[in-house]
Image (cartoon, helix red, strand yellow):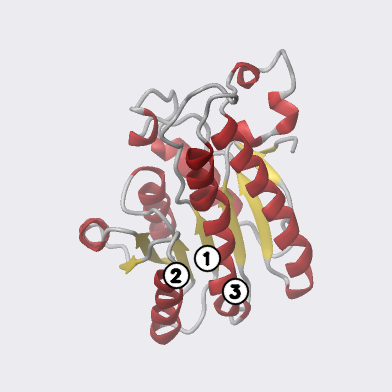
Amino acid sequence: MRTALITGANRSIGFETARQLGRGGYRVWLGSRDPEKGAAAADRLRGEGIDATALSIDVTDPDSVTSAAATVRERVGSLNLLINNAGIAGASAAAPSAQPLEDVRAVFDTNVFAPIRVTQAFLPLLKASDHAAVVMVSSGLGSLGWLSDPEHPFHRINLLGYNSSKTALNAVTVAFARELSASGIKVNSVDPGYTATDFNGHTGYRTVEQAAAGIVWLATLGSDGPSGRFYFEQQEVPW
């Protein structure tokens, strides 16, 4: 059975991604910072007939990530799919000139440094599988092409911490894709779109089902699929 780990999977897009992968035959590990919420989410999926296991992991804590990787290694020995989904918007929506540096640093810690940390920790397990992929859940607000286009709707959204963190995550995607191409591990970024979740007070126009479908599509492409690319709705997005 193919195995997937999704961080931030106890609710919203991460949870629905786990559900769709589980329905597709994957054994899913639900990464969650809160063990109780993770266990409850896994119970819900098991109630639907999905092979789901809660995994306690705080992506900003090196010891927690190391422990989580050890747990998966002891239980299954390999990993086919890693989806770095956990992310934050930041506490401040101030103009770039006024956003506190501490807030920007916190956003980068979760949105950039954590995916690097998690990918590095689980890389031996990915290399131990016959076919592996890593998906970074980014945002269209990380596309410099879209943000710099006055005709694009995202041009007016100027969030220093969040936008630049997703741009940085895209650069991280390219770096891992280049290194891991020789190992056959695909690494791509995906924009789930403006989705109605707790993340944005449910103001998004897309459903979690739509958002997760794009992630699952990219995550489950065959061994001849692309690597080092950025997608939204199965269409390539400019960096």
Between discs 1 and 2, the one toward the N terminus: 2
Residue for badge 3: 123
Q: Quadrant of residue 64?
A: bottom left
Give the SS element for disc 3: helix
Q: Residue at x 40, y 50 (%)?
A: 14
Q: Residue at x 64, y 36 (%)?
A: 142
Between discs 2 and 3, the one toward the N terminus: 2
Q: Quadrant of the N terminus?
A: bottom left
Is residue 22 visible from the viewing direction of this image?
Answer: yes
**Could you tell me residue 217's position as x and y percent?**
57, 49
**Alpha-carbon distance for marks 1 and 2?**
6 Å
Q: Amino acid at mark 2?
A: Val
- Mark 1 and mark 3 in contact (Cβ < 8 Å)? no
Compared with residue 15, is residue 71 higher up or lower down, i.e. above or below? below
Nearest-to-viewer mark from 2 and 3: 2
**Alpha-carbon distance for marks 3 and 1?**
8 Å
Residue for badge 1: 118
Residue for badge 2: 65
Q: Residue at x 74, y 23 (%)?
A: 148
- Mark 2 and mark 1 in contact (Cβ < 8 Å)? yes
Label tally: 3
Q: Quadrant of the C terminus?
A: top right
Q: Amino acid at mark 3?
A: Leu
Q: Nearer the viewer, residue 13 or 161?
A: 161
* Disc 3 residue crowd, few under 14, some 14–19, many 20+, Cα 10 Å: some
